[in-house]
Image (tube, coloured by chain):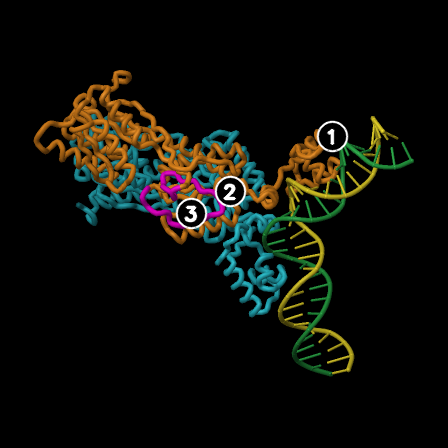
Chain colours: A orange, B cyan, C yellow, D green
Amino acid sequence: MKNTGDRRRTIYDVAKAAGVSISTASNALNGTGRTNAETRERVRRVAEEIGFRPNALARGLLSKRSHAIGMLTNDTYGRLTLPMAAGVSEVLVDHGVSVFLCATNNDPRLAQLHLEALLDRQVDGIIFTATRLDLEPPVQLSRLPIPVVYVFAEGPADSVTFFPDDEQGARLAVDHLKELGRSRILHITGPRDYLAARIRAQSYHDACGDGAEAMFGEWSEEWGHEAVQTVFARPGPKPDAIFCGSDEIARGVIDALRDLNVEIPTDVAVVGFDNWEVVARQTRPPLTTIDMELKELGHRAGLAILSLSKGEPVPAGITRLPCRLVVRQSCGSPLQSD
Amino acid sequence: MKNTGDRRRTIYDVAKAAGVSISTASNALNGTGRTNAETRERVRRVAEEIGFRPNALARGLLSKRSHAIGMLTNDTYGRLTLPMAAGVSEVLVDHGVSVFLCATNNDPRLAQLHLEALLDRQVDGIIFTATRLDLEPPVQLSRLPIPVVYVFAEGPADSVTFFPDDEQGARLAVDHLKELGRSRILHITGPRDYLAARIRAQSYHDACGDGAEAMFGEWSEEWGHEAVQTVFARPGPKPDAIFCGSDEIARGVIDALRDLNVEIPTDVAVVGFDNWEVVARQTRPPLTTIDMELKELGHRAGLAILSLSKGEPVPAGITRLPCRLVVRQSCGSPLQSD
DNA sequence: TGCGATTGATAAAACCTTTTAACAGCACGA
DNA sequence: TCGTGCTGTTAAAAGGTTTTATCAATCGCA
């Protein structure tokens, strides 16, 4: 018999049905003020019975907190954004906070439009995500009356920012290769003007020392393919391992190696970066790679914006979340050698 | 000098600054009621100057329309959802409607939680998306007080539903192959318990007639690989074209063909399905495939939920949006033969 | 001049909830 | 008997907007 009517039940309905005033009803439901235990129970029972649910708009209007946040992204295909957004949404739904998704397509007009809509809706905070680190946010976010958290994107100096720990991730990959006895490790990665590519390459250099060679190119399979062909065509010693800047590159690398009849992992071990399952699972052999823990990144960003919106202090600056090594078969780990 | 204060400007501020009552201010800004042209201009100018933006919560509370909708999805990786969601968001932002993104992870508890949050927020409608067509929605959506639009998922009989036109898409692929002179066309596709796979296979059968053979398996590269090996290992005539149920399958098919030293497209032409650029662009040769126009699907779903939320009639039933043939090089079209 | 119609503006109500301040009732101690 | 303090409840205000009904002023016309 709950809420068979057409109209949503309000706290007036609860109050009337329980024979109390709306203030008492509100107090009873929220446990605020002073209420007789017996009354409180009755009100709550009645509310449950008639299917009362408080109107979030009215609540937000009064409290000036909408319990909603906005996510501004310029990632079109969602490979990075959606797992992260799912993480944000997952951690926030339990706190009664919902997430507006705003795709900007890198269009400043669209970004501005979305931003204004978010502010009009009194969102409690904004998470800004970019796929390209070095691109300016398409819109001015620094002097907003609400907190902003940056993920995969660098904000102003004193802002709260989350990144995967590219340095640690790269070290994880190189260390894994070294432990398996590889010594001539090559690095094939994306464009030099990506900060992530530079950091990973630096970390690789630090770990490998003198013989290290990092080849910058594109974030594409084709580039991986091409780079391998170049390396194996020139004279001199060949690498016995390749650390790739992305799973896509790794895929191109693996294909090229097979074309050259180079055995994986016997002759050359390959490590990727991303753990983009749809690629990493499908290479032959399946790809050992570095997972950036996107969902965890989303969790942390969600919790950060939640704290900030409550006025709780959150350490400013860049937080780098550790990556995780996912061992499959492209390195011939003794644990999973088949 | 616009809005330098700490507090958001309200219509009271506008009214005071313009020397009118709030009713007049409201009327002037919205063009409702009767207002002197001169007054109207002045109010608007003042509003602009002090940076007034109406509070969407207050507005929604009164009008009972929040100008927000919810998107419920169980797609984790976002390959289908995010392009679609971007389409929805893109078309709705111009109408002042924002989108809540709710990832359910196929968890009924989570779905229920999200649904209740959406209802509490008075959303004007819900778009439900699934990746698996045949799965039940994780939550009861049929008797909601707000309209629901289904995309990639079948709702109750009289609901508004959008799908890509799998039948037409498959025909597009087969016709393309036939026009190029191919006659022994094989179909390798996903599991038979996917409705989309069955429809595409049926369409393929209708177009190819007697010699047609559809092989059902997985939505994976591996399956494409395996299927090709099977076919080319057995006696009898070999296909001169393969129509694949997904780009991933096509990728496996192409790899297997190359392993067998079968020339593409000379010996065998290959068509995919999805136009998942990150795959289709990277196969060698680049893959001719069928695009499901996900963004357009999002546009249409967005417009439908918009109309429904305004009480405008929308034709019920399943609308199937045409797919598009994307010609690359895996069929050796005379137009793009290099 | 007087009257109905029109124009422009406004006060007040409404949306639904939470919170503050006030109130009535009662027990207790002086 | 009179304050004092406590308990449980409630009226009223507040939040920011839109809408309805009302009001005052002006205009046209007899």
Which amino acid does the dot numbered 2 rest on? Asp
Determine which of the numbered discs, if any, sits on residue A36 in the image.
1
Q: How much space separates mark 2 and mark 1, taking CA atoms?
A: 34 Å
Mark 2 belongs to which subunit? A
Q: Gap in Å between the C-alphas at discs 3 and 1?
A: 48 Å
Q: Are marks 2 and 1 in contact (CB under 8 Å)?
A: no
Identify the image quadrant of the C terminus of chain A. top left
Q: Which numbered marker is on residue A124?
A: 2
Q: For mark 1, give the secondary structure.
A: loop
Judged by its main secondary structure, the magenta piece is loop
Quick one: label 2, few (<14), some, or many (20+) residues within 10 Å? many
Which three-letter amino acid code belongs to the residue tagged 3?
A: Ser
In the rendered view, would you say A120 is above or below B103?
Answer: below
Q: Which residue is drawn at 19% across and 36% down?
A: A215
Q: Which of marks 3 and 1 is in front?
A: 3
Q: Do the residues labelled 3 and 1 touch (CB within 8 Å)?
A: no
**Position of A280 relative to A333 (above/below):** below
Q: In this view, does B89 lie above or below A267?
A: below
Q: Name the residue under label 3.
A: A142
In the structure shown, which secondary structural element does the residue marked by tag 3 occupy? loop
Disc on the earlier residue, 2 or 1: 1
**Residue A125: in magenta span:** no
Image check: A104 left or right of B14?
left
What residue is at 31 percent from the left and 44 percent from the top? A134
Magenta-drawn segment: A133-157
Frontmost residue, A24 versus A82: A24
Who's the residue at 18% across and 46% down the image? B337
